[in-house]
Image (cartoon, grey):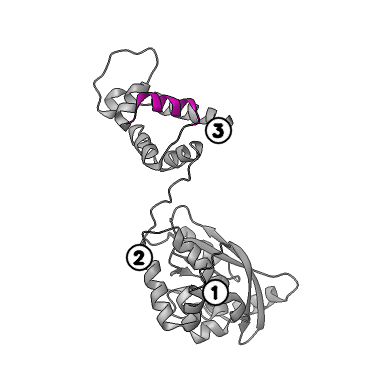
Amino acid sequence: MGRRTELRDFLRSRRARLSPEDVGLPGAGRRRTPGLRREEVAVLAGVGVSWYTWLEQGRDITVSPQVLDAVARALRLNHDERAYLYVLAGCNPPLPAPEDGTPIGDELRRLLDAWSPRPAYVLDRHWGIVAVNEPARTVFGLTDDDHNCLVSFFTSPAYRSSFAHWEAAAPGVVAQFRADAARYPDDPEFARLAADLCRASAEFAELWRRHEVRSATQGIKAIRHSEEGLLVLEYTSLPLPNHPGHRLVLHNPRPSTGTAEKLERLAGSVVVPHP
């Protein structure tokens, strides 16, 4: 009942902040209570008055994303309020529209730099490398030719050889990419990437045919470095709400592996050019 009560109070509060004039309806003089009437919201949303009344009362009725969107438009809900309405109505909120080619802000770039000497980078929804700090370049051997982590994982000999347990990690990598692709069923870029990789890598093609799915936001990477040897890193992947479809991947040294000291030495040996 808590969610239904919240739904009732939320919809009432959104009605109360709007006047008929705000939504293009003729004014009706002074009202006993401020805001739109339920009947007016129903008309604006194109739904039955009884149905909208039941929705606002929190009754156990069937709702669809299309009808919730109509109610959201009628009540002039912003993105956060629309998602909140979905949750209260018992539906999964729609994914925000992904950003294509939108540069990340200076604040996020400063965060990447501040994470040094630990590796960090930002990926877009297609696993494209959007931003990377110097420790990540050093640890993973990234070059200017590496534009996509998935592509490099299967087609770059240098990137591949940096993973100490590549064969064990590969199935999970492909399963994670398939899970990510399922979140964007109308995005043809996922299918294009998969098709290109199937032609370029027999190993990817075999794993892709398995149709395995895995969602993971944390894990461990064992990396071979030419100077410092084995580096064992814990990683955490964090979504970036201000950049829909993007995620920040942070790496920390695994305790008791000597990795922290190795990262410090690597950071001291890297000369970062000044602009």
Which mark is on residue 136?
1
Q: Residue at x 46, y 81 (%)?
A: 143
Circle nearer the N terminus (1, 2): 1
Q: Marks 3/2: CA distance?
A: 37 Å
Image quadrant occupied by the N terminus:
top right
Looking at the image, is mark 1 or mark 2 nearer the viewer? 2
Q: Residues within 10 Å of mark 1 (few under 14, many from 20)?
A: some
User: Dot 3: within a 10 Å radius of its alpha carbon, few (fewer than 14), some, or many (20 or more) residues?
Assistant: few
Camera-side residue of 232 and 37 = 37
Name the N-terminal-most of marks 3 and 1. 3
Secondary structure beneath dot 3 equals: helix
Question: Which residue position holds label 3?
Answer: 3
Q: Which mark is residue 181?
A: none
Q: Is residue 181 above or below residue 145?
A: above
> Is 56 placed above or below 134 here?
above
Which mark is nearer the camera, 3 or 1?
3
The residue sitting at 54% across, 74% down in the picture is 136
Q: Give the image quarter of residue 196.
A: bottom left
Residue 90 left/right relative to 233: left
- Which stretch appears magenta? 47-60
Image quadrant where residue 164 sits: bottom right
Q: Secondary structure at mark 1?
A: helix
The three-letter code of the residue at mark 3 reads Arg
Image spot of residue 262 (x, y percent):
67, 78
In depth, the one of 248 and 94 nearer the eye is 94
Instruction: Give the residue pinned by disc 2.
Output: 188
Task: Check residue 57 for magenta coloring.
Answer: yes
* Mark 3–mark 1 distance (CA, rounded to whole Å): 44 Å
Closest to the observer: 113 or 71?
71
